Amino acid sequence: MDTNFVGENLGPGKLGHFFVILFFVAALFSAFSYFRAAKTEADAQRSVAWLRLARNGFVIHAAAIFGMFLTLYYIIANHLFEYHYAWEHSSRALPMKYLLSCFWEGQQGSFMLWAFWHSVLGLVVMKTSKGLESRVMSVIALVQVAIATMLLGFYFGPDVKVGSTPFMLLRHAMANAPIFQQANYMSFIKDGNGLNPLLQNYWMVIHPPVLFLGFASTLIPFAYTIAALWKGEYQTWIRDTRIWALFAGAVLGTGIMMGGAWAYESLTFGGYWAWDPVENASLVPWLTLIAGLHTLIIYKATKRSLPITLILLSLTYLLVWYSTFLTRTGVLGDTSVHAFTGEGKSLYWHLIVVILVLLVLVLGLLFYRWKTLPRVKGEEESSSREFWMFIGSFVLLLSSLQITISTSIPVWAPLAKWITGKEIAPPVDPVQHYNSIQVWVAIIIALLSSAILYLRFKASDGKKVWRRFAGLGSVAFLLTALIGYTQKINVPQYTVLLFASVFAVVASFYYALGIQKKLMKMGPAVSHLGFGLTLLGILLSSFNKEVISFNTLGVTIDFGKKTAAENAKESRENVLLFRNTPVAMGDYLVTYEGDSTSSSDPRTFYKVNYEKKDSATGRVEEQFTLYPDAFVNPKGQQGLIANPASKHYLGKDIFTYVTQVLDPTKRTDTAAYKSYTVKKGDSIFLANGFVVFNDFEEPRYEQQTGNLSVKARLTVYDLTKEVGHLSPVYAIENNSYQSFQEDTLKSMGLYARFVKVLPDQNAVELQIRQTNPKDDYIVLKAILFPYINVLWLGIVVMVIGFFLSMYNRITKKEKLPQVLANN
Amino acid sequence: MKKTHVVILVLVAAAVAVIVSMFGDFSTYETFTSASKEPGKQYHVIGFLEKDKAMDYDPVKDPNHFTFYVKDKSGKVSKVIFNGAKPTDIEKSEQIVMTGYVQGDAFHCSKIQMKCPSKYKKDQVAVGNAG
């Protein structure tokens, strides 16, 4: 580079690069030292020396990640657009609260966030893992090395690139652009590209950190599993692994459902779950994690199921990497609504290498230890808890297998094309595809999750258990009949699911309060209760989900086979609303009452009024206003990006979003002013109301001779009530110059001018104009979700259950030779 | 044989059956010509927007009716009818994936997915002196 560029601030970038390299080197050093510490275990003195080095290395690596974070934040917050990351993901107009969201819009920022959580969790593990520290931390540090390589951005020759750094300069990222031939190019770059409007939402501030914490926390059970295999000792790892698996289950579960809540609150998918590949990719590791957690519990209680536990817990972490592969490399391409932009070939192969390294590590160790893994001779009793728990875990594994196969279509489609010659595409109706299979999984898991609470490890008292099941079953049956009848759930498999989830709720509830009674021990019952409620909420809200903007009564969307023509008919879900012209939707009379913008918010808000009247008396039973909003013509593109608005009730949600608006740049105003001569108290009639001329009002300031300024006071009524005032002003200067100030009332589309005073008639002349309501319209979609709160409640209860179990495990003293409690 | 093994075998057999039957559920990518061999059957078609031909969407007439022309990968141009509002930014799409069926001389689609790599970020520097 010979050019001396002007106006660049290169300091932060250099500092950032330094932190990236420090992160890499310190992680490598820590991994190596931990490895040596584990290898030299026999020699306590040497081992401790290595351990000390390793710990220092790990602390330094964590500090480097923190430094990296702060540096990038500084670059974004100070709008240093000479850096590609800031230029690509932020802009000057971006509100403060979304600055952090820039981190997770880009690929490098996401890896940084992931590394950050790994390091935080690693520090906790360092303090708590005792005898297993050297081995567990070796694995964690090794994974950190892998992530560090993703951020290095080193070139080996012109074609091979390893990682990409978030501190790259704009002029390096786009080296060929002619603008960078100029030394003063910075004076042309005034603003960045800005954050994707879809991410400018509070859910997007909190959902990614929680989801990434969930992903990161699956590393810890994985690291413990590797450590146990490496050591060839399968006792000491149980307690901590279980606690971390519970933690990961809670956080990852919360993260996934926050994603659902984000989709529900701010995307226009029309729901919280669409079986989109990106959603599936985060659900699958959670399923295998939950399966692994349960087989670990079996192993703890009975010494059975060790091999499958090791497999499931390692598989979970491998699947987290696989999900990164699916979502980050663009391999999903056409199949996902929100596939992220790919980083190209380098990331593709980089991720494959990392996954292969981890896979070889897991398989190698399993193969090496397989013969020596402790096993129990003899069979489980079929009345035992472990027998059914094992079946449940296995079903979860199969369920995740099915989801993975269907989600990975774009990955294996080239192979299928080679064999069959056909280009396989995802199912035409993915929701129907997954629902029709996973409903059976849900039924089995719901029944098992509540039933096993009543079983005991080794063997149960058959008679007592059956008596309880008979009682709970009949209660659940009655409730199912009641709910099924009132909610009109009449498809056989969904009726079975209804019974299964009601049974899960009833049985877990009774177990918690009727049998267990001690809060600290309630974890499993509470999380299973939450699971039952979640299933019930999903069933109720989606089975009777009703598109009310579809003028004939909505038909269920996701359930039951349909022909193509029926599908086409059902996609007619949009309704046109002219301003101030009510349209009937479901039970509601819906009116679009105009839009509004403000200087501090780039969005346009649309005021939509909902009214429900009693058909007999005509009395208004329910009335509310929603403000769905949209970015209209954001940055150089045509059209709009809409955000929904919902009215939340305890029993239902009414979900509304705008699908089309009249382009404000093309809006024409066809109405003209009309003149009226009126006296005090006279009315002027409008299309949808009238205006009364009340009085004059003289301005407060002192009148000068020859100058006159008068205000007319008008009151505006619609057909039923007073809606506002208008005060146009008429003025004369130096006895000759007339002028007037117009006044407007937006809600009625009304413009008024005061143009003449007629003293001889004791009257005034007004000019009134009302915009034609047909000049302004929106196209809107509205969906009614019944009982969606049952779903959200279920998730919250489930997560509380996880944390209860975790707390119980942490505080409980184990009867083990090595006590692993905190010191 | 142990009971658990029997159960695993049964479950695996069931899973294999489900997964095999699942393949019937998967759709295929077709062209307009191959999709027209079975009118009314749903397929995925990948194509490119014909920007010279008229796009028609008048929400005042029907907010759920949008027609446009697409050239598929084999080069055939067909009219496409979408039962919904006009998708944002379709003019800028580089590639369109449509789910639907052929009926008469048009392709009726219920789902449109557009590929706009430059949807929100254009990797071109906007040069301007205005602040």
Image (cartoon, rainbow, N blue to C red):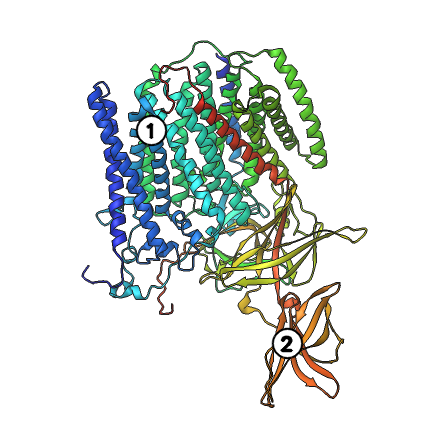
Q: Circle 1 sits on which residue?
A: A127
Q: Relative to residue A174, is residue A297 drawn left or right?
A: right
1 and 2 marks in contact (CB < 8 Å): no
Q: Chain of mark 1?
A: A
Residue in front for this viewpoint, A797 or A629: A797
Q: Relative to residue B58, is residue A141 drawn left or right?
A: left
Q: Amino acid at mark 1?
A: Lys
Residue in front for this viewpoint, B120 or A529: A529
Answer yes or no: is residue A404 visible.
no
Q: Position of residue B94 (x, y in %)?
A: 44, 56
Q: Position of residue A174 (x, y in %)?
A: 30, 57
Residue drawn at the location 22% of the way across and 22% of the way down = A40
Answer yes or no: is residue A798 visible.
yes
Classify 10 Å Cα crowding around label 1: few (below 14), some (14-19), many (20 and above).
Answer: few
Quadrant location of the C terminus of chain A? Answer: top left
- Number of dots carrying numbers: 2
Q: Amino acid at mark 2?
A: Pro
Q: Position of residue A185 (x, y in %)?
A: 28, 65
Q: Position of residue A35 (x, y in %)?
A: 25, 27
Q: Which residue sits furthest top?
A: A378
**Secondary structure at numbered mark 2:** loop
Q: Relative to residue A240, is residue A391 drawn left or right?
A: right
**Secondary structure at numbered mark 1:** helix
Q: Quadrant of residue A245?
A: top left
Residue in front for this viewpoint, A437 or A266: A266
First in sequence: mark 1 vs mark 2: 1
Q: Which residue sits furthest left?
A: A2
Q: Circle 2 sits on which residue?
A: A728
Q: Is residue A265 above or below residue A291?
A: below
Q: Chain of mark 2?
A: A
Q: Is residue B128 above or below residue A516?
A: below
